[in-house]
Image: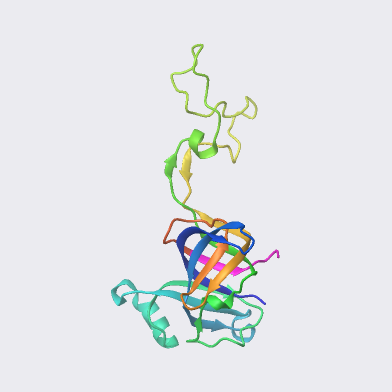
Amino acid sequence: MKKGIIGKKIGMTQIFLENGTVIPVTVIEAGPCAVVQKKTAETDGYDAIQLGFAEVAEKKVTKALQGHFKKANVTLKRHLKEFRLEDVSGYNVGDEVKADVFAEGDKIDVTGTSKGHGYTGAIKRWNLSMLGQTHGIGPIHRQSGSMGVIDPARIFKNKKMAGQWGNEKVTVLNLDVVKVDAEKNLIAVKGAIPGPRGGIVFIRNSVKA
């Protein structure tokens, strides 16, 4: 069964299993999320629910969105995300989705925004080798080598060059849910996930499991 939730990355720690094995985990504050909108195949052509996460002041929400939340009788939320589901009959507008929608042992995909490093040179961005330091090579060493061939006398697409590094949408697939704390709305996921501490992430059941 498909399911999803919005969360906030808290940080990384480690969990000890009964046999003494140490597992590195990322702790995510998952929910509580409110169901702001419900879409069905009859009305919209597909089944989905729109979730809202994190309270926000009224002055930071547009009037159009304020009306959207008012229609759903839901308090104003900072983040909205739509999750496609196979069946939405179990959800109603105004319902609350908590961390216990997932259970220990589930396989999930986590989507977030990677850390931004700004405009970065090719050496740091792509881990290219530096140019020679001696024999008259220079005066620049931290740049990529040849840009292309003589014919067709142009640079091909996807050439590794300097530019914006990070701050892009990244999805990590097939992560394991190690622990779920329903009371504190926390999910411990094995391994690392994209983004800095405090970054917003979207969790769904794995599409390839």
Colour convention of the picture:
rainbow
| Residue at screen point 62% across, 57% down | 21
Q: Position of residue 119 (x, y in %)?
A: 42, 42
Residue placed at 49% from the left, 12% from the top? 136
Q: Is residue 63 left or right of residue 49?
A: left
Magenta segment includes 165: no
Query: Could you tell whether 169 is left or right of 56 in the image?
Result: right
Name the quadrant of the N terminus: bottom right
Nearer to us in this view, 71 or 3: 3
> Residue most toward the left?
59
Task: Tell which of 46 and 111 is nearer to you.
Answer: 111
Quadrant in the picture for the C terminus: bottom right
Residue 93: % across, % down: 50, 87
Q: Is residue 17 above or below residue 184?
A: above
**Residue 120 at x, y = what percent?**
45, 39
Q: How many marks?
A: 0
Q: Measuring 60% from the left and 63% from the top, which residue is drawn there? A: 17
From the viewer's perspective, tell me whether residue 119 is left or right of residue 46.
left
Residue 97 drawn above or below residue 10: below
Residue at the limit of the structure toward the front, as seen here: 19
Describe residue 76's horizontal placement relative to residue 89 as left or right: left
The residue shown at (44%, 86%) is: 72
| The residue positioned farthest toward the top in the image shown | 135
**Which region shows up in magenta?**
201-209
Toward the viewer: 109 or 101? 101
Indicate whether 58 appears above or below 176. Answer: below
User: Residue 50, percent across and down?
Assistant: 52, 77
